[in-house]
Amino acid sequence: MTTIIETKNLTKKYGDVTGVDDISLSVEEGEFVTLLGPSGCGKSTLLRMLGGFEEPTQGRIMLAGCDVTDVPPSKRAVNMVFQDYALFPHLSAGKNVGYGLRVSGMAKREVIAKSREALALVGLEDRFDAAPHMLSGGQRQRVALARAIVRRPRVLLLDEPLSALDANLREQMQIELKHLHTKVGLTFILVTHDQTEALTMSDRVIVMRNGKIVQSGSPQDLYENPRTGYVAGFIGNTNLFRSRVETEAGKSVITCFGQPLAAPEKSASLSGHDALFGFRPEKAALVSNTEQPRQNTLRGTLADVLYHGKSARLVVDLGPERFVVDVPISDVSGVSGLPQVGDPVALNIEPHNIMVLEDEVTG
């Protein structure tokens, strides 16, 4: 693959505050990359520097092998979609899409043809003459996307483009945005704080914290193999606990709030040391209290049951902490004597489902 964007030691400071801290990264042509992190982590600042809307304090930005660090936005082969759509209210959808083409001097007939083509790509070919106030929020966002791709930029930058939409429309637009990426074949770089959005659409997710990149990888890799407690907690839900790793009869053993567990193999080198561990809610299995005790079973009290359609989230009180467990409804209904809130419950976690994490939790 060809590298389309590369940054070298990119830094942005606002007085004594560092927004982006010495970031070097590369993005391959045609990739869908998401910058993920909480508010204030530097993801939007990084995106705006790639688009030319923020000037780096230091470092360089390369686009298709050319240094564009000091090139203005209008001269870069990139385009940006903003969270507030930024449509001209007095222009129709078609004229909004074709605005940039018109001011560049393109012939009217060609502007109309290209604008119609771009609107067709986002499913709005029949709304060419509609004013923005006649469109729904999702349709306005599609017009903004059509305007951004009509000139076929090398890279499309998306700054939380779906944050203003309601939950159902947002989910629909996630699918459509991914489909659009496949159709047009451009490089997409998305900024979001929504983990589901990042996991759903991206080829690669870059997790940021305090202006730095803390981990980068495919959605599956980040979910299954987070390096730190911070990443584990930001990419999906994770039950975290700390324990000293002990060796008993040649095997590694840890404790979760006083209850012994066989430790994962990768923790063997940590014997005699404290470490951070975690497991995903769906990796624990609800077992009947009437069954024979299994290895790696935690026992607690059911504090709450949250119905999620095809699954249920069980909130289990382990004394000082509460863990959450996600189980399919079919599994729950199959447990003999389904516990009620306040009843004792047992959870089985296989050692290979326990993650060993670097001790970095808070954002």
Image: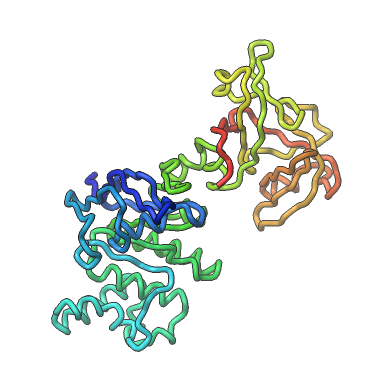
Q: Nearer the viewer, residue 147 or 229?
A: 229
Left or right position of 42 against 74: right
Q: Which corner quadrant of the image does residue 68 belong to?
A: bottom left
Q: Nearer the viewer, residue 209 or 269?
A: 209
Name the residue: 30% across, 54% down.
56
Q: Position of residue 328 (x, y in %)?
A: 66, 48
Q: Position of residue 72 (x, y in %)?
A: 22, 64
Residue 324 drawn above or below residue 184: above
What colouring does the structure picture have?
rainbow
Q: Is residue 35 visible?
A: no
Q: Is residue 16 above or below residue 150?
A: above
Q: Is residue 322 left or right of residue 343?
A: left
Quadrant of the snapshot with the N terminus: top left
Q: How many marks?
A: 0
Q: Left or right: 11 with respect to 234?
A: left
**Residue at the spot x=65%, y=15% of the render?**
247
Q: Residue furthest toward the right? A: 342
Q: Position of residue 140 (x, y in %)?
A: 41, 77
Q: Quadrant of residue 317?
A: top right
Image point (46%, 39%), residue name: 221
Q: Residue furthest front?
A: 15
Between residues 266 and 129, which one lies in front from this camera angle? Answer: 266
- In the rendering, at what x and y percent does residue 225 appear? 50, 36
Q: Residue at x 23, y 55 (%)?
A: 69
Asked whether residue 83 is in view, the answer is yes
